[in-house]
Amino acid sequence: MTRFVLRTDGGARGNPGPAGAAFVLTSPEGDLIARSGRYLGETTNNVAEYEALLWGLRTAVERQATPLTVLSDSELMVRQLNGLYRVKNAGLKPLHEQASRLLARLGDVRVEHVRRAANTEADALANEAMDARGDVGDTTSAANADFGQGTLFR
């Protein structure tokens, strides 16, 4: 069975520091469905990784992109989502809970770790958003409406 693919990346320059989040969603045939990046302001790298994932998952739910494979270069986040690591950081717990709810809504989802070299488009978008201190890529999705306002994924 072919799958949709969601690549996510978040980063912060300094930890915490100016941060960005991005995702790229493709169809099972490899066609681009959506690609977006957003400047997050000052936050940590781990929060930026989760924000990128949440934004991408919200878009996947909106586009009914299932079955889905999520690819991220955040080993910590991937291991937390797959139940291999506990979420100890109080700031990440609500983000992890939101991600778990979205993953459950999508049903058939695999979350896999990839090296940064296999995640170049999402990485580039996150960096572009940090450089621009604004939105980049496709920002027309309804999933973007409240992004960064703390309300979209709750």
Image (cartoon, grey):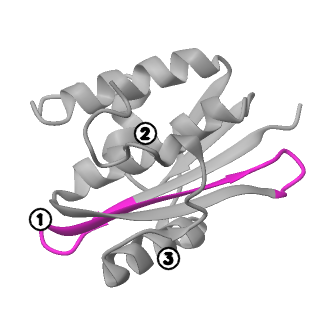
Query: Which mark identifies residue 104?
Result: none
Q: Nearer the viewer, residue 50 or 2?
A: 50
Decide: marks 2, 3 in contact (CB < 8 A)? no
**Kind of residue at badge 1:** Asn
Sequence order check, earlier mark of 1 and 2: 1
When the figure is inspected, residue 88 is found, relative to residue 40, above or below; the finding is: above
**Residue, disc 1:** 15
In the image, residue 14 lies in the stretch drawn in magenta: yes
Q: Secondary structure at mark 1?
A: loop
Q: Residues within 10 Å of mark 2 (few under 14, many from 20)?
A: many
Where does residue 143 sit, x and y in percent of width and height?
A: 52, 41
Q: Quadrant for residue 149, please give it.
A: top left
Relative to 114, residue 64 above or below: above
In the shown orientation, is residue 42 left or right of residue 142?
left
Report the side of 43 relative to 114 (left or right). left
- Quadrant in which the C terminus is drawn: top left
Viewer-proximal residue, 80 or 25?
A: 25
Q: Identify the residue at horizontal 30%, vertical 76% (top origin).
A: 133
Q: Is residue 27 above or below residue 104?
A: below
Residue indicated by mark 2:
54
Q: Is 125 rendered above or below residue 2?
A: below
Name the residue carrying label 3.
124
Residue 127 lies in the magenta-colored region: no
Question: Label 3 is placed on what type of residue?
Answer: Ala
Q: Earlier in the sequence, mark 3 or mark 1?
A: 1
Task: State the residue at coordinates (73%, 34%).
Answer: 65
Q: Which residues are magenta?
A: 10-31
Cα–Cα gap, marks 3 and 1: 19 Å
Q: In the rendering, at what x and y percent does residue 139 appear?
A: 55, 59
Q: Could you tell me which residue is drawn at 90 percent across and 51 percent down?
A: 29
Quadrant of image for the N terminus: top right
Does residue 25 appear left or right of residue 132 in this picture? right
